[in-house]
Amino acid sequence: MKKKKTCTYIGGQAVIQGVMMRGKRGMAIAVRDDGGTIRMEAKRVTPPEKRKKWTKLPFVRGVVNFVSSLVVGMRALLRSSEVAISDEGAPSKLEKWMADRWKISLTQVLTVLSTALGVALALLLFVFLPQYFTDLISRAAPHAVPLNSVYFNLIEGGFRLLIFIGYLFLTLLSKSIRDTYRYHGAEHKTISCYEYGMPLTVENVKKCTRVHDRCGTTFMFLVMVISILVFSLANTLTSDFLSTGIGPLDFVVRFLFKLVLLPVVAGVSYEILKLLSKTQSPLVLPLKAPGLLLQKLTTKEPDEGMIECAIAAFRKVLDMDADPESPEKTFATETKLSRLSAMMKKSFAEKSIDESDAEWILSLKLGVPRSKLSEERVVTRAECADVLEVFEERLTGRPLWYIFGDASFYGYTIKVDERVLIPRPETEILVQQAVGIVEDGDKILDLCTGSGAIAVAIACEAAKDKNVSVTAADISEDALDVARENARLNKANVTFVRSDLFDSIHGRFNLITANPPYIRSAEIDSLQKEVRGFEPRIALDGGEDGLEFYRRIAEKLPRYLVRGGMLILECGEDQAQEIVKIFKKCDYAMIVKDLEGKERIVKIVM
């Protein structure tokens, strides 16, 4: 194998039926489910430059990274199990009872229990048992192996190493763990492939080594060795200050003291591992060799599917580290409604997305009124998948109602996509004002109709007890296609005309409505991403001062509005007074405020 070109900062671990990779700004877990599909979860992590300075100090950073890796690794392992282990079929009686009575899932209970048992087992195997066996020997031969002797500490450390190596061999008896070791091999091979400067393909990864200097197995071996030296301090101090000999009190004190010294062991081991990984010199090979040999047990040759998982996770982390806009992804698993809601709102808040969008997604996808989302329930994996599909697309910045494909406006369903603006609640005030003055036989014109929301709502409301004719105009043929679909959907009798304001309009009208573009040109680029990046600019740009379209309407209005007729306009919150000045030749003008007290509607009578 040729010499490495780089030493990447990306690390990882095997999880159940997959691989987790972690970089400076992102973490990704790729798991192959029972159907053979690679499923991904990707989350952002706190970058190095935003971490507290004290966490980067030598030895302290080792403890911080050890605890962080332990917590993150355990979470990744448990998250992968929720995906890898199928929950198909009807839930058991116990699962139903727990969901109904306690609003929790059996998986969550098992997760907590397995975490607690895992920590307890590690302390039992690697701290309690070595001390216990060595104490037995010391009792049997107190003069040959006294408590504070070098022999006592070496024997205790030897037991710790033997239990560790024996534990690794025992794990090989389990097929599921052997498969996890194969994923561990895929993780190492993928990282090595990148470090050798080779393209990340299955064939290239196959050629690479499955042992790596920064492996957790090597770290754990170093921990075992360093603990011999550090834990000897516990034995020496307790023998000096306690006169009870090797008794119950002495045993408990030494055990607790070793627990206190675990951070020291982790900190020193981390610094040694970091130093060893920075050099390929043959001089340090004897120090690396034991850990590298143990990796032959904890890594096995992966198949192509396992390598594909590792490559997918690695590429996602690379992308997240390079691109701050790279979207996060979430596994679809059984979970509590409150937990899912909290996760979504937190993610939206970080992206400056209105948290109410999370409530709308949950309400519409789960069929639960927003007012009842506070009532706890278990969300099934299938339901969660439906919710997350919309959630992850919303994180890209795409407006929620474009994702759903329609919006509610004045009680009517209005189809929307990137060809038209999404109708806003404040525009309903315009419709309310219009419907309140419509009389039987009136001719109505809606300019800049866009989705047709205003025209459709007025036509449908008026048709309940009046006979009116409604014409709607827009310069965009794409927008008119959407408007025609909305008229058909709501059975509204509206005539659509392609026209730049009044250019292709004939006749006079009793009522003219318009929600024209009114955003100042210079302000468009400062709007929210979901507006400037997705909604049509032609429907937003109102010229230098935002009033260009109002001037054009005022110029030709007398030719198209009957005497005594009314023009109703929507405007920006600071534009109403200026618009009234533009229509200075009218008989009178009235300004209507929205629910927030902002001047939103201007009514003009000629």
Image (cartoon, rainbow, N blue to C red):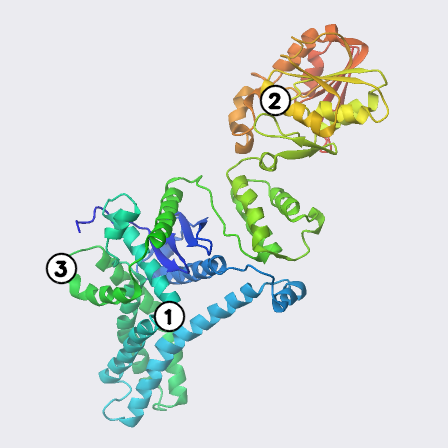
Q: How many badges with numbers are in the image?
A: 3
Q: From the top left corner, tell me how far across and down residue 326 is, in percent.
A: 43, 41
Query: In 3D space, how far apart are the residues under numbered discs 1 and 2 (Cα atoms)?
Result: 62 Å
* CA–CA distance in space, label 1 to label 3: 36 Å
The residue under label 2 is 479
Is 109 left, or right, of 413 in this rendering? left
State whether residue 114 appears in this view: yes
Q: Position of residue 287 (x, y in %)?
A: 19, 65
Label 1, secondary structure: give it.
loop
Q: Secondary structure at mark 2?
A: helix
* Residue that mark 3 sits on: 282
- Residue 549 screen position, x and y as percent: 63, 14
Q: Residue at x 39, y 45 (%)?
A: 316
Residue marked by disc 1: 174
Q: Residues within 10 Å of mark 2 (few under 14, many from 20)?
A: many
Residue toward you, 368 or 137: 368
Amino acid on which the number 1 mark rests in the picture? Ser
Q: Residue 439: horizontal and vertical position, in percent?
A: 85, 19
User: Residue 210 falls in which quadrant of the image?
Assistant: bottom left
Q: Earlier in the sequence, mark 1 or mark 2?
A: 1
At label 3, which amino acid type do we have?
Answer: Pro
Vertical position of residue 553 compared to residue 123: above or below:
above
